[in-house]
Image (spheres, rainbow, N blue to C red):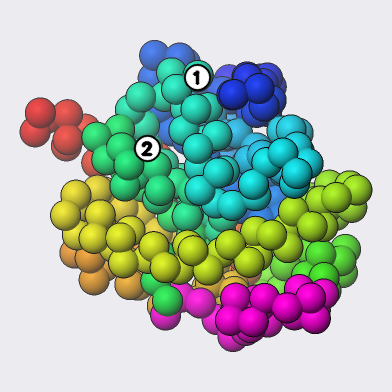
Amino acid sequence: MTPITYGSTDVNGLKVFYRQSGPSDAPKLLLLHGYPSASHMFRDLIPPLADRFHVVAPDLIGFGQSDMPGRDGFSYTFEALTDVLEGFTDAVGFDRYALYVFDYGAPTGFRLAVKHPERLTAIISQNGNAYEEGLSEGWNPIQRYWKEPTDQNRTALRDFLTPQATKSQYLYGVKDETLVAPEAYQLDSALLARPGNDEIQLDLFLDYANNVALYPKFQEYFRTKTPPLLAVWGKNDPFFLPRGADAYRRDISNAEVHFYDTGHFALETHAGEIGSVIRDFLRRKLSSRASAA
């Protein structure tokens, strides 16, 4: 088994932590995490893919082991996170890659795709939404903050930042909770508890409205560029509904959609199954594109 190694690189004075595995000359696969996680969420997915792909998973700025600059010196928007992410891909030599997006990884990854469509070979979306019908009622408190960004509505969202809420995100919709490693949500909670991180997350909750505003642009990219797309979706996700996965077929007719009887963090319970589907999907799609070229 190919070992996972850990490192960091400098992007405009910011340290971006990442984990990687696989031969450097193999087809490249970029894994993008979501809220409130980090690249740690890919610990079980990377090993079964690393014999065939060069897999790299960074931590977004403000998350995991990457730098967490103060809000007075860094604007915590998804556009700013994407700018750093673009610099990261340049720094590690990812000029042509398949993209795996989850949760916050979707609006950052899809921004990269729109900006550099020539770099993407395929997309895997694991509960990574790009359609309004994919948003559940669980978003209502956050959407209320978008419409009325008052201190009261901001304070109400602090309930999402508690250890209880983080644990619930991992366990909701999971049939066998013994499959979920407790250190996963405990690590996320510890990182959320860092001084100042709460305000960073609240800033990103507010800015998520700009991601929804970009959904039409993301969908136009899907229609015009028709990248090979695989959706692997925890169907019991309390935030991103199965309709969001099915909607990809509207813009990419041959998109492949797989549902799993689990929750938001589908890799916690189904990493093996999802890894096998990804291997098969990329083998078929990358080989067919190479033949066409």
Q: Please name the residue shown 45% across and 22% down the image.
A: 90
| In-front residue for pair 46/8 | 8
In the image, taking residue 101 as reference, residue 224 lies left or right, namely: left
For marks 2 and 1, give the CA distance: 14 Å
Identify which residue is drawn at 47% across, 62% down: 211
Q: Which quarter of the figure is the C terminus placed in?
A: top left
Residue 126 seen in the current view: no
Residue at the outermost front position: 72
Q: Is 6 left, or right, of 104 in this rendering? A: right
Residue 208: image quadrant is: bottom right
Residue 171's tag is: none
* Chief SS of the magenta region: helix
Q: Residue 154 at x, y = what percent? A: 76, 73
Q: Quadrant of residue 219?
A: bottom left
Residue 283 lies, with reference to residue 79, above or below; the image says above
Q: Residues within 10 Å of mark 1 (few under 14, many from 20)?
A: few
**Residue 30 forms part of the magenta stretch:** no
Q: Which residue is mark 1?
A: 92
Instruction: Report the residue at 89% width, 52% height from top.
Output: 193
In the rendered image, residue 172, in percent from the top left (x then y), is placed at 71, 73
Q: Residue 98 has which mark?
A: 2
Q: Which residues are magenta?
A: 133-156
The residue under the point 35% across, 72% down is: 246
Please, what is the three-letter code of the amino acid marked with disc 1? Val
Is the residue 218 above or below the residue 290 in the image? below
Marks 2/1 in contact by CB < 8 Å: the verdict is: no
Q: Secondary structure at mark 1?
A: loop
Camera-nearest label, 2 or 1: 1
